[in-house]
Amino acid sequence: MNKLELKLCILGNLGVGKTSIVNRYTKGVFSLSYKSTIGVNLVRKDINIEDFGDVGIQIWDLAGQQSFKIFHKKYLQGADGAFIVYDVTDTLSFKKIDEWIEIFKKSGGKSPIHLIGNKIDMRGSISVSENEGKSYAEEKKIGFTTTSAKTGDNIENAFLGLVRTILKKK
Ligand code: GTP
Ligand code: MG
C-alpha cells in the first residue's frame, strides 16, 4: 500500500512565527532574523505515528502579508488540516484568528484546524494569556497548543496533535 501523504497548511498574521515553527520542526533550527515569506514555503517531512505507521507530511507555510491573499484559495485547496498561528505578545494577531478560520473554511472545507499561540518564551511581554487561547479554541472546538519556535517547546506536540486528529477522521 502507498504511504499516506497529508497536506498541512500553516496560516496566521505577518511575523507570528509560522516559518520559524516549520523550520524548528523540520530542521531543528531557529533564527532571530526575520525573512518574511514570499508567497509560500513548501516543506516535506516523513514521520512515524504510534499505532498507525509512516506518514508523509507536506507543509504549506503561507505568507502572512496581505498582498499574498490572492493566492490563499489555491494554496489551501485539498488541505487535510491547518494550523492557525498567533503571537502571544501580539493581541492583534489573536483578534485576526476568526478571519483566518474563515479563509481556511472557505477553501479547506471541514478539515481540522489546530490553533497555536507562539513565542511563549517571551515571558515578560505576553499579552494573550494561555486561558484566553484555550477558551477560544474550546468554543470553536479546535485543538490548541502554546509553543516556542525559539526553544522548541511543544512544537512536536502541536504537529502530532493535528496529525492524530486528521488520522482519526480518516
Ligand atoms: P511571514 O512569513 O511574514 O508571514 O512571517 P512568519 O509568521 O513566517 O514569521 P517568522 O517565522 O518569519 O518569524 C518572525 C520573527 O519572529 C522572526 O524574527 C523570528 O525569529 C521571531 N520568532 C518566531 N518564533 C519565535 C518564538 O517562538 N520566540 C521568539 N522569541 N521569537 C520568535
Ligand atoms: Mg513566513
Image (cartoon, rainbow, N blue to C red):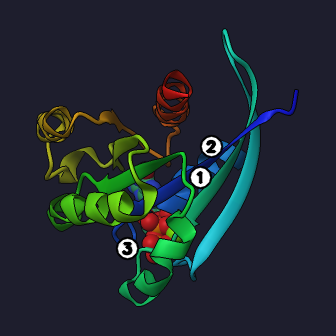
Q: Are marks 2 and 1 in contact (CB under 8 Å)?
A: yes
Residue wearing tag 2: 25
- Residue lying farthest to the right in this orientation: 1
Q: Quadrant where the C terminus lies? A: top right
Percent of width and height locating residue 115: 33, 44
Q: Residue at x 51, y 64 (%)?
A: 76
**Residue 38, which numbered label?**
none
Which element carries disc 1, helix, strand or loop?
A: helix
Residue wearing tag 3: 14
The residue at label 1 has a CB less than 8 Å from ligand 1? yes
Percent of width and height locating residue 73: 47, 73
Residue wearing tag 1: 22
Question: Gap in Å between the C-alphas at discs 3 and 2?
Answer: 19 Å
Asked whether the viewer can see residue 60, the reply is yes
Which comes before the other along the chain, label 1 or label 3?
3
Residue 126 located left or right of residue 18:
left
